[in-house]
Amino acid sequence: MGLETKPLSTLHEKSSYDVADFPVPTGREEEWRFTPLSRLKGLHNGTAAVTGGVVVDVEAAPEVRVETVGRDDARLGKAYTPADRVSAQAYSSFEKATVVTVPKMTAASRPTVITLRGSGAGAAAYGHILVSVEPMAEAVLVLDHRGSAVYADNVEFDVAEGGTLKVVSLQDWDDDAVHVSHHHARLGKDATFRSFVVTLGGDLVRLSPSVSYTAPGGDADLTGLYFVDEGQHLEHRLLVDHSVPNCRSNVTYKGALQGDGAHAVWIGDVIIRAEAEGTDTYELNRNLILTDGARADSVPNLEILTGEVAGAGHASASGRLDDEHIFYLQARGIPFDEARRLVIHGFFAQLLEKIEVPEIRERVLSAVEAELAR
């Protein structure tokens, strides 16, 4: 399988399973200009040889089938073709993959939790996960990243006709971890995909969620929450590719930043191709900058090639805490620190309510509290 070029001028014009089809990034390319390449520990140029591991532990719902397979398994790589060099490197370098299958017309009785735990600082590893939701099936999946590693992986979500998949991906790495990942959802007819990404830990995390549609009626909702501390680089690059009629997508990402050198990057690309009439899409990014020295880059892109859309829009804003909100609370006897905490909680509140796994919701809330206490 060689290089594929899409007939469209976007940041995602190439895809290939072969690392050699992608030049080594220099940092001047549009898709890499925000990423500090020196902190990738060789994931981008082929020098990150496998020296460690990320242990994958699956606690599956009883209705779900879980397999560990070799890279020659024919099911792998069908839903997604790598779109950058690190993704291609991860695809060509993993040894074992985890395959989760939700059988046809089955509703999983509880979430399936995949815990990925890094084995040590600086230890490089590559991985692959495939989640296959068969027709009319329903499941909730949690991806829980912990420990320390230099890790690149691809995750395929293949949701067949009438299927529903809800995913919570928690990046709760140790402070020295480096993680570059691509999550891709391929949606069949009338399929539903709900993604909630929470990124808190790690030295550098670059996560690229994407969605494609194979038939009308697909519905994708991508939500994200991130909290960036001093020196951290947390980057989220999203792509929703509307290539068939009458599909929907909604993207909402919010982040808070504090500390010198805290850097958040959010890139939101939505493509509505000429054949995708009746598309309904919206994307939103908000960044709350809590201290001097923090930086947020937010770039929404909306490319529309048909006039027959149900709705299309985007919005982006980054700013400080609202002094009027703080003053309002202080005027009612609430101390400054508590007023600040309440305003930040309000900023994230609607997003937190969308996490359907109570234990994860409480864990994220506790993590945000801990960030505010620093």
Image (cartoon, rainbow, N blue to C red):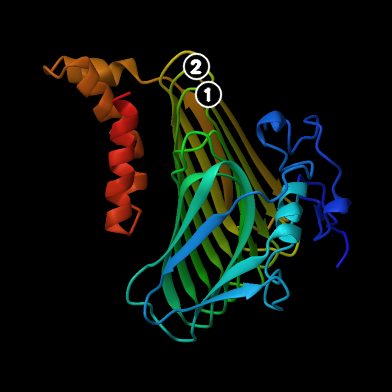
- Quick one: quadrant of the C terminus? top left
Sequence-earlier tag: 2 or 1: 1
Distance of mark 2 from mark 1, alpha carbons?
Answer: 6 Å
- Quick one: quadrant of the N terminus? bottom right
Foreground: 255 or 109? 109
Disc 2 marks which amino acid?
Asp
Left or right: residue 330 compared with residue 249: left
Left or right: residue 294 compared with residue 39: left
Q: Is residue 321 visible?
A: yes
| Residue in view at x 53 percent, y 83 percent | 135
Whether residue 340 is situated above or below residue 166 in the rendered picture: above
Disc 2 element: loop
Q: Is residue 237 visible?
A: no
User: Does the residue at mark 2 contact the one at mark 1 (Cβ under 8 Å)?
Assistant: yes
Horizontal and vertical percent position of residue 213: 64, 67
Q: In the rendered image, which quarter is residue 310 located in?
A: bottom right
- Residue pushed farthest left? 333
Crowding near the residue tagged with mark 1, few <14, some 14–19, many ≥20 C-alpha atoms within 10 Å: some
Horizontal and vertical percent position of residue 133: 52, 76
Foreground: 365 or 217? 365
Q: In the rendered image, which quarter is residue 11 located in?
A: top right
Foreground: 206 or 175? 175
- Residue pushed farthest front? 51
Q: Which residue is mark 1?
A: 231
Horizontal and vertical percent position of residue 225: 44, 42
Horizontal and vertical percent position of residue 29: 80, 34
Q: Which residue is mark 2?
A: 260
Left or right: residue 225 compared with residue 119: left
